[in-house]
Amino acid sequence: MNGARTLYVVLLGVIALGLAYVVVLGLMRR
Amino acid sequence: MRRLIRDNALGLVFLALFLLSLAGQSISGVAAFNEEQLAGGGSPVSWAAYVTSSSFAVDVAENWQSEYLQFLLYIMLTVWLVQRGSPESKKVGEEGPQSDAEQKVGPHAGEDSPRWAKATDWRQTLFGHSLGIVMGVIFVLSWLAQSIAGVAAYDAEQLTRLEDPIGWSRYVLSADFWNRTLQNWQSEFLAVASMVLLAVFLRERGSSQSKKVGDPHAATTSAD
């Protein structure tokens, strides 16, 4: 299950980073 | 290593497809963006400038929010609604959150059940709804992100048209915001209805999302 847990954390990390990226670009009015 | 890849093939392949598609979107996106720029008398932008633009960000976020809404609704509605004959559904009569014994929680939990499933307090409740909560949180955040990047992209275009920027509170009521939102929602809901209903009468041999080829159309799960 360790492989799946790693992917689970990576996925949630990608989503969190992606959302933060979109919000930052929006707030910076790029 | 081989075992690790095989055990996680489904997750790995979809993560890889996601990254490849996102890269493809950025390349075709900058080409489409520059076509419009040139047609409007503007100057083309670099790939790096495009992927750090709110125009790219809003395109990504509007698709994310609709996917998470789709799965959120699917997860929540399949608790209470059934579709006779669909492998995507519980059996008719099993609607609702079911008993603690059926859900293997609290005193009914097994040795190898997750720790919070064995709990009898708020932890069991929270863990018992964690999938819906996380999908819901991601949906709300990505819809909010869509609106924030969306208004930035929209106002930038307004300025190139020598019109006034409208700001977030007017943007979330605007045609642009709802057009981007609903054009994604409609396709998600059609796809879910297709999955639920087509799988009653059609089969894909070997797929976990299909009934067995020989299962009767009326059988709601493969176990019937």
Image (cartoon, coloured by chain):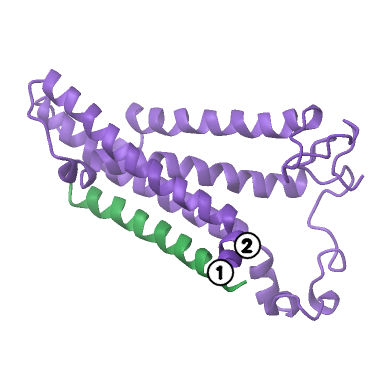
Chain colours: A green, B purple
Q: Is residue B138 above or below residue B107?
A: above
The picture places residue B47, in percent across and down from the top left corner, at 18, 41
The picture places residue B161, in percent across and down from the top left corner, at 12, 24
The picture places residue B208, in percent across and down from the top left corner, at 73, 46
State whether residue B146 appears in this view.
yes
Please name the residue that numbered disc 2 is placed on. Answer: B7
Density class for disc 1 (Cα within 10 Å; few <14, some 14-19, many ≥20) is: few
Same chain for labels 1 and 2? Say yes or no.
Answer: no
* Left or right for B61, reference B66: left
Q: Chain of mark 1?
A: A
- Mark number displayed over residue B93: none
What is the distance, in whole Å, between disc 1 and disc 2 at their CAs? 8 Å
- In front of the other: B7 or B203: B7
Q: Quadrant of the C terminus of chain B?
A: top right
- What amino acid is found at the position of numbered circle 1 in the picture? Gly
* Left or right for B75, reference B118: left
- Residue at 86 percent across and 44 percent down: it is B222
Q: Chain of mark 2?
A: B
Q: Quadrant of the N terminus of chain B?
A: bottom right
Please name the residue that numbered disc 1 is placed on. Answer: A3
- In front of the other: B97 or B31: B31
Q: Is residue B99 above or below residue A18?
A: below
Q: Are marks 1 and 2 in contact (CB under 8 Å)?
A: yes
Could you tell me which secondary element the residue under label 1 belongs to?
A: helix
The picture places residue B186, in percent across and down from the top left corner, at 53, 28
- What amino acid is found at the position of numbered circle 2 in the picture? Asp
